[in-house]
Amino acid sequence: MDLLTSLKISASGLAANKKRMAAISSNIANAETTRTAEGGPYRRKEVVFGSEPARETFSEILEGEIDVNAQTVQATEVISTNRPPILKYEPNHPDANEQGYVAKPNINVMEEMANMISASRSYEANINAMNTTKNMAMKALEIGRN
């Protein structure tokens, strides 16, 4: 695998984790939202990941071999989960039903914080991989100068 492919793979990981952190942030921010534009409480968002071959430019293909095994990660879609809402008895709440229950999002803030830490660590790992690739390229240039 060449250095540019390595950078592409890390960059795709950064982009995917950025979307994951955005979805988690939205979940935390809306953990108490009882009314949305669609009606009903906010539904937890989750990012679905997939992989696809690392694309090579035409000039890269002409200059060397195609690495058919190199894969990049992609955030293919953001879905709303099917977790049922939690009913809480709050008869004075403006969104309470006839029995006095309010449908609240089924979001565990502690779980979301753990997911945020995981996404942050993954983001950091991709940055470290990019920095390692950059350092390898710099060392190769140093060797070439000598």
Image (cartoon, grey):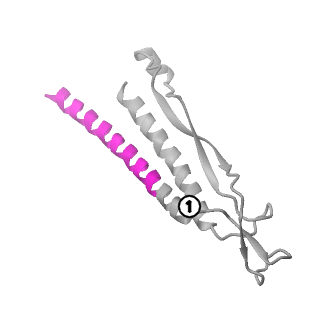
| Residue at the extreme left of the image, as rendered | 146
Q: Is the residue 76 above or below the residue 21 in the image?
A: above
* Residue type at numbered disc 1: Ser
For label 1, the residue is 25
Query: 131 or 140: nearer the eye?
Result: 131
Q: Quadrant of the C terminus?
A: top left
For the point 69% across and 52% down, the residue is 80
| Residue at the extreme bottom of the image, as rendered | 92
Query: 41 or 99: nearer the eye?
Result: 99
Q: Is residue 71 magenta?
A: no
Residue 13 position within the rendered picture, expressed as x and y whole percent measured from the top left: 47, 41
Q: Is the residue 35 above or below the residue 69 in the image?
A: below
Looking at the rendering, the stretch of residues picked out in magenta corresponds to 117-146
For the point 60% across and 61% down, the residue is 26
**In the displayed structure image, the side of residue 73 where residue 35 appears, left or right:** right
**In the displayed structure image, the side of residue 41 where residue 18 appears, left or right:** left
